[in-house]
Image (tube, rainbow, N blue to C red):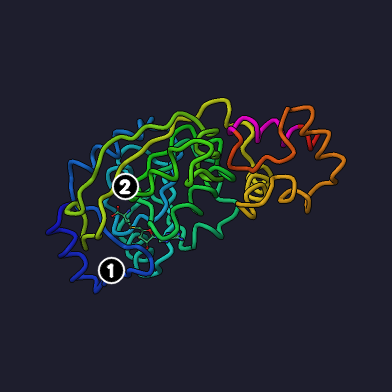
């Protein structure tokens, strides 16, 4: 899909991009092809796309697999895709609300930036079995994804990303690659699952969120709502965590140890 096709489609279908849904449609064929090839698809793969929009990534992926599910919040776009894409399952819903979608091998999304953190957290929580994830994100959001303890940006998102697997910054994407053009530069990133993702589950994600419930408070205070102080003191002692520790000081692996110890 190039700029002319997208503009023509928007005009013939009466589609006005909705900024409340972060609608910036990808119109650079080279970038689209690169995203598709990063997905490293096998024909039997079950693929999940979040926010297909007008189908810039959806069309080429549908040529490579018979098992593509797309979740689109915008009713007009979902109706357009349902009518024009054969053999693709289009679910019209807010991805944050969907349940029982099935299992997938690969997830891909030009992520609506306003809801990036929640979408990624849901993927790591409910779809952590996925082998490969490829995302377009706002370039400035990378600081929250690729960072370590004791930095301002370190939090649940960085911890889940790190536990899910190997992260790679693939390439920068200029704002001219979209219709309409966003104000910021974007980037394509990828994650390849490793065994450390085995711990990821809705319960574990809830636990990590609780650890950061009040960022400046001590970890033991944040966890006092979900476990007894005796249990906490003994787990801290066992794992060598200081009683005065804050969540932002712990390595991703320490959250795994603490979760396992508290649930033993
Ligand atoms: N994938 C298309 C592309 O690359 O041109 C569109 C990308 S656009 C940045 C984001 C898409 O996500 C839009 O189609 C928007 O309607 C959809 N979207 C926004 N919030 C969503 C949500 N919570 N659940 C599902 N889709 C959502």
Task: Specify which label sits upstream in the sequence, 1 or 2.
Answer: 1
Which residue appears farthest toward the left when viewing the image? Answer: 4
Q: Secondary structure at mark 2?
A: helix
Residue 26, above or below 36: below
Name the residue carrying label 1: 17
Ligand 1 falls in which quarter?
bottom left
Find out whether residue 255 is within the magenta segment: yes
Q: Which mark is residue 112?
A: none
Tell me the crowding category of disc 2: few under 14, some 14 to 19, or many 20 or more residues within 10 angstroms, Cα based.
some
Residue 191 coordinates in the image, percent (x, y): 43, 34
Q: Which residue is mark 2?
A: 139
Instruction: Judge left or right: residue 219 versus residue 238.
Output: left
Please tell me which residue is depicted at 67% across the width and 40% down the height of the picture.
245
Residue 23: in magenta span: no
Location of residue 56 with respect to 67 vertically, above or below: below
Mark 1, other Cα within 10 Å: few <14 / some 14–19 / many ≥20: some
Left or right, residue 123 beside residue 11:
right
What residue range appears in magenta?
251-260
The local secondary structure at tag 1 comes to: loop
Q: In front: 163, or 146?
A: 146
Residue 112 at x, y = what percent?
38, 57
**Residue at 79% across / 27% down in the picture?**
238
């Amino acid at each position: 899909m190039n700029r002319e096709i997208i503009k023509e489609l928007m005009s013939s279908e009466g589609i006005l991009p909705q900024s409340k849904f972060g609608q910036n449609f990808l119109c650079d064929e080279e970038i689209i092809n690169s995203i598709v090839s990063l997905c490293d698809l096998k024909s039997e793969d079950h693929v999940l796309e979040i926010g297909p929009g007008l189908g810039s990534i959806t069309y080429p992926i549908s040529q490579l697999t018979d098992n593509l599910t797309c979740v689109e919040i915008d009713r007009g776009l979902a109706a357009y895709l349902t009518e024009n894409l054969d053999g693709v399952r289009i679910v019209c819903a807010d991805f944050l609300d969907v349940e029982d979608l099935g299992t997938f091998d690969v997830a891909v999304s030009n992520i609506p930036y306003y809801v990036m953190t929640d979408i990624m957290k849901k993927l790591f929580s409910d779809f952590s079995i996925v082998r490969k994830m490829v995302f377009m994100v706002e370039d400035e959001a990378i600081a929250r994804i690729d960072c370590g303890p004791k930095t301002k940006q370190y939090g649940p998102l960085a911890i889940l990303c790190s536990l899910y697997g190997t992260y790679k910054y693939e390439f920068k994407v200029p704002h001219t690659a979209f219709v309409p053009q966003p104000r910021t530069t974007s980037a394509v990133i990828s994650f390849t699952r490793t065994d450390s993702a085995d711990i990821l589950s809705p319960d574990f994600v809830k636990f990590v969120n609780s650890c950061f419930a009040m960022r400046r408070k001590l970890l033991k205070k944040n966890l006092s709502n979900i476990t007894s102080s005796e249990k906490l003191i003994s787990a801290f002692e066992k794992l060598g965590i200081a009683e005065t520790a804050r969540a932002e000081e712990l390595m991703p692996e320490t959250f795994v140890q603490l979760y396992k110890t508290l649930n033993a």
